[in-house]
Image (cartoon, rainbow, N blue to C red):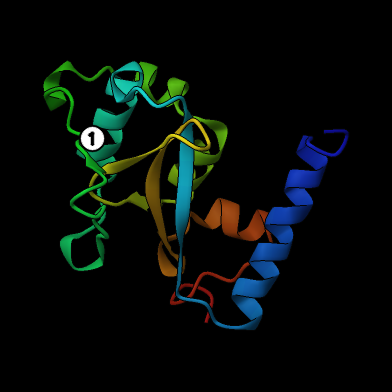
Amino acid sequence: AAYRNRAVMQLLWRGIGAYVTRFNIEILFGCASFHGTDPQEHAMALSYLHHYHLAPEGLRPRALPGRYVEMNCMPKEQVNVKEAFVSLPTLIKGYIRLNGYVGAGAVIDKEYNTTDVSIIVKTDLINEKYAHRYGAEVHGKND
């Protein structure tokens, strides 16, 4: 807990940036979580991600049918974009700021008490401000 601070996170992101550059990584993927297992508690945030940050179809992972939880909880016109963004967990905000995407459907993880979303970041689309901050070259922009 003593090392969960901004300075340590900056170092971790710089390490990821260096790795992306050194090994010419084109896509980063994984998952990020909301606290809790009730997706309705995160309806606006999940809907925001679905409507504004869904990965393109050819790149979009989809939760397994038996685990799939709908993220499209409310119509796009009912989503308060500012409120939804503010309510996102910090890590998900970070990926969105990098121009990251989410996959289709969330997954409930009862063991960890989380609602998980798939995250995809194409390194050639990373916001240049963040690419330079974390020491990564943006493929196709700085080659």
- Pinpoint residue 64: horizontal percent, then vertical percent: 24, 55
Residue ID at (29%, 44%):
53
Answer left or right for 83 relative to 16. Answer: left
Question: Which residue is rendered at x = 73% and y = 55% of the image?
Answer: 12
Taking 141 as reference, is 16 above or below it? above
- Judge whether residue 51 can be spotted in this image: yes
Front residue of 38/5: it is: 38
Dividing the picture into quarters, in which one does residue 9 lie? top right
Locate residue 68, reporting x and y percent: 23, 44
Please give the name of the residue rendered at 43% of the width and 43% of the height, measured from the top-left corner.
Answer: 96
Q: Residue 35 at x, y = what percent?
A: 49, 27
Question: Which class describes the residues within 10 Å of circle 1: few (<14), some (14-19), or many (20+)?
Answer: many
Depicted 112 relative to depicted 16: above or below: above
Q: Residue furthest right?
A: 2
Decide if residue 82 is on the left or right side of residue 132. Answer: left
Q: Is residue 103 placed above or below 35 in the rendered structure?
A: below
Residue placed under numbered mark 1 in the picture = 71
Q: Is mark 1 on a helix, strand or loop?
A: loop
Q: Can residue 81 be seen in this view?
A: no
For image coordinates 27% across by 60% down, the residue present is: 61
**Which corner quadrant holds the N terminus?**
top right
Note whether 111 is above or below 23 in the view shown: above
Residue type, label 1: Met
